[in-house]
Image: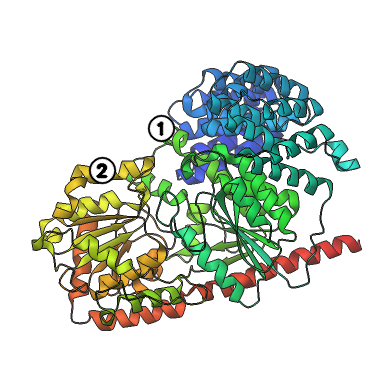
Amino acid sequence: MERATMSAGATRVALDDVRNAPSLLAGMRAIEGLSDAAAAEPETAETVRVLLAAILDPTDQLAAIGAVLALGGVRHERSGSALITVLREGPSYLRDHATWALGGCEMLPNALPLLVSAVIEGDFRGMLAQRTLESWALRHPDDVRVMVARGLATTTVTAARSRLVETLGLVPGDATQSLLRAVALGDLEDQTTRATAIAALGDPPPTRERREQGFTPSASTLSVLTMLAAQPGALSPVAQLALDDLRAVAEPRSTTRPEGDRTVAQLFLHADIDGALTHAGRGDTGGIATLLVHLGDALLRAEPSVCRVLTLSRGRSAAALTALANVEEPGHHYLSVPLWGQSPQAARAWPLWVAARRGIRRALRVAGQVDALHLRMADVGSLAAASAAHELGVPLVLTLAPDPHALVASREGSGELTRATIGDADEVEHLVFRDSLLRQLARRADHVVVFPRADLERDLRDLLGIDVDDEQLRLSVVPEGINLPALDAGLRHASPDAGRDTDTDSARGVEGTSAPEPSALGELDTLLDTLPAERRGLPLAISVGRLHPVKGMATLVQAWASRPDLSSRCNLLVVGGDLDEPNDDERGQLDLIGSVVPIGSAASTGLLLAGHRPNATVTTWLAATRHGRGDAAAARGIYVSASLKEEFGIAILEAMAAGLVVVAPGNGGPATYVTSGESGVLADTASVEALAAAVVAALDLAASPEADSTAERTMATVRDRFGIDTMATTLAGVYEQVATARHTAQAGGKAS
C-alpha cells in the first residue's frame, strides 16, 4: 500500500503545481512540467490512475486538460485506451486535447475511426486529428490510408471529402498517389475536392528512401498534372503549381545568394495584402496588414540593407504563379499562399494548416536563401510557417505579444474565467493550444522581439513566463512605426488650404507610400452630407479598425449614445468592416450597434458607418478630423480606440501624428506613449461608463486653449520615436544578427 501511495510521486507533485498555480496562466505553463513528469515515471500504471482521477474532477477543468495532455506521453496501454475513452465519451472541452495528445502515442487502431470522424467534422479538432494521423502515417501508412479511404468511400459532403483527400495526401506511399490521381481526374468530383487532390500530388510526404536516395516524381503523376495544367479552367494553375513543386523537390535549386544580399520574409495569412492596402479594415485585414506593407518598403531603405522582402498572405493559385515568377529580383514581393474556396475568419482558420504549410514552404523554397522569417502571433499561419521554416532551415524571428494571455488575465481578474469554466472557453478559443504554440515558437526562435509596455519585465514574467535576465534569450524591444510620408500626404490633402473641391485637388505620392485618393475628402463630405442640419458643424470622434469584438466598436457606439452630453457634442465616425458582405464577427458587431442605434437611420443620430477604406483615405480623414470640414464638421475632433487590448496601436499613433487627441486602452502598449490628460486619455475600454467618460475628457482636451501647442509637441514626439524607418532600421539589425549567427554556425558545422 505504501509503495502504491509513493509511486507516480513526480506526477502528483507536478499535478499539484497545476492545481495550486497562482493564476490560470501559471497553471497553463505548469502543464508542460506535468507532461514531462508523467512521461518520465517508471510506474506508468499508477501514473495513469493519478491522471484519470484529475480528468474525472469537474471542479478543476485546467488540471483535467493538463492530465489529458500528460497521458499522451505515458508509455502504457491504459493511457491510450483512456485517451480513446475521453475522445469518445469525455466532456466536450476535453476532446480536442485527447486528439492532440494521441499524437504523442504509438498508433492505436481503435482510435483511427475516431480521428477520421474528427477530420470529417473539421474545425480545430479536425486539424488536430490530421496532425496526429500524419505522425502515425510515417510508421503505419497502410493502416492510416485504409481508414481514411473508408471515410472517403462513405462521405458525400464536399467539404468533408476535401478534408479527407487532404489528409490522404499526408500519407506516404505509391498507393496513396494512385488514390489521389483517381480523385484529381474524377469528373464526378467537386472542383474543391479535385483541387485538394491535385495540390497533394505535388507535395508527396517525405520517406526514408526519398531522403537517402533522392526523389524522382512518378511518371503517372507527372502525366496527370501536365494534362490538367494544360486544360482551361480554375484547376489549371493548381496543377501548374503542383508540377513546379515536384520539380523543385526533384531538382533543388541553389539557395546561395551574394554575401550581404539579405532576404526577409514576413507573414500574415488572414488578409489580402497588396501594396495599395486596398482591403484595409475589411474582415481580418487590419493594422498588421498596414504595418507589413509599410515596413516591407522601409526595410529596403534600411541600414543594414535588406535586398528582398517577401510578404506572404492568403491568395489564389493563379496569383501565386504570377508572383513567384520574379521573386528572385530585389524589391518588396507580395506572395500568395493559395487557399481554395472562401477564406474563414482568423479564429476559425485552423483547418487551413496543410494548405498554408504547403504554400509557405513553396514560397520559401522558390525564393532561395531566406535569412529570416518573421512571425507575429499564435495562429495557424505561424504553426504552418514554423514547420516549413524548420524543414528548410530558415531562421525564425518572433514578435512575442501576450495574446491571448492579457485577455485571460483580465477575464480571470473579473471572475469571468475560473478553473471551473476555463475548459468551456478553451473549447471555443483554444487558449491552452495557443499558449503552448507561442512558447514553442519562442524557444525555437533565433531572436525574440517584444513591444514596449509600461512594466515590460513584470508583464513578460507574469503573462508569458519569460525571464528577461535569461542569458539564453535573444530579445529586443522594438516599437512599431508609422508611415510618416503617407501621413504627410494626407495632412497636406486635408489642410484648410486644400479647400472643399476635391475633384480637382489631387495629392502626389511619395516614394514608398500610397497617395491619398483624389476623392478621399469628397467621400468624407458625402458622408457628412447625410447628417441632419442640427448635427452639422459638430466635431468628429473617429475610430478606425476592424469590426471585431476585440476592437470594441459596438461598445464605443453604446458609450457615445448612452450619454446625451456626449452624443450632443460630436458625431461618431466608425471606419472599418465590410458593410455589404460582413463576415460573422462583422455581422455580430453590426447587430450590437443596431440594437443601440438603428443602422438604417444611424446618420440621423450622428453615427456615420463608413465601412473599410484604403489606408491613404484613412490618413486624410484623420487630418480632416483635426482641421474640420467647413460648416459640415468643426475642427478639433478626436480619435477613439475602444479596443479591449492593443499590443502597441498603429492606428492610435497615426491619429496622434495627425495632431488628434486620442482615447486609448490603459493596458498594453499605448500607455508607453499616451500621456493621459495631455496627449490623450487612457481608459478602461471594457467599461461603457469609463469609455464614455474618457471620450468626454478627450473632447475637453481638444477644445482647451493649450490643444494646438500640445498637438504640435505630440506630433513631434511621434515623428521622432515612431517612424516606420526607425522601426525598420532596428529590425534590419536584428535580421543581420540572425543571418550572421546562422551562417557562422553553418560554416562551423562544415569545418568540423
Residue 539 against residue 577 in the figure, above or below: below
Q: Could you say where residue 402 lies in the image, as x and y percent from the top left?
A: 48, 54
Query: In this rendering, is residue 659 above or below 592?
Result: below
Between 278 and 420, the one nearer to me in the picture? 278
- Examine the rendering and report whether any part of residue 473 can be seen: no
Name, please, the residue furthest toward the left. 534
Task: Tell me where residue 83 sits by quadrant.
Answer: top right
The three-letter code of the residue at mark 1 reads: Ala
Q: Earlier in the sequence, mark 1 or mark 2?
A: 1
Which sits in the foreground, 709 or 583? 583
Residue drawn where x is 75% and y is 63% of the image: 742
On screen, residue 540 versus residue 150, left or right, reads left
Residue identifier under label 2? 592
Q: Quadrant of the N terminus?
A: top right
Q: Nearer the viewer, residue 166 or 527?
A: 527
Element under label 1?
loop
Q: How is the image coloured?
A: rainbow
Q: Amino acid at mark 2?
A: Leu
Give the residue at mark 1: 420
Residue 423 in view? yes
Give the residue displayed 82% in from the left and 36% down from the top: 207
Q: Quadrant of residue 605?
A: bottom left
Q: Residue at x 65, y 75 (%)?
A: 305
Q: Quadrant of the C terminus?
A: bottom right
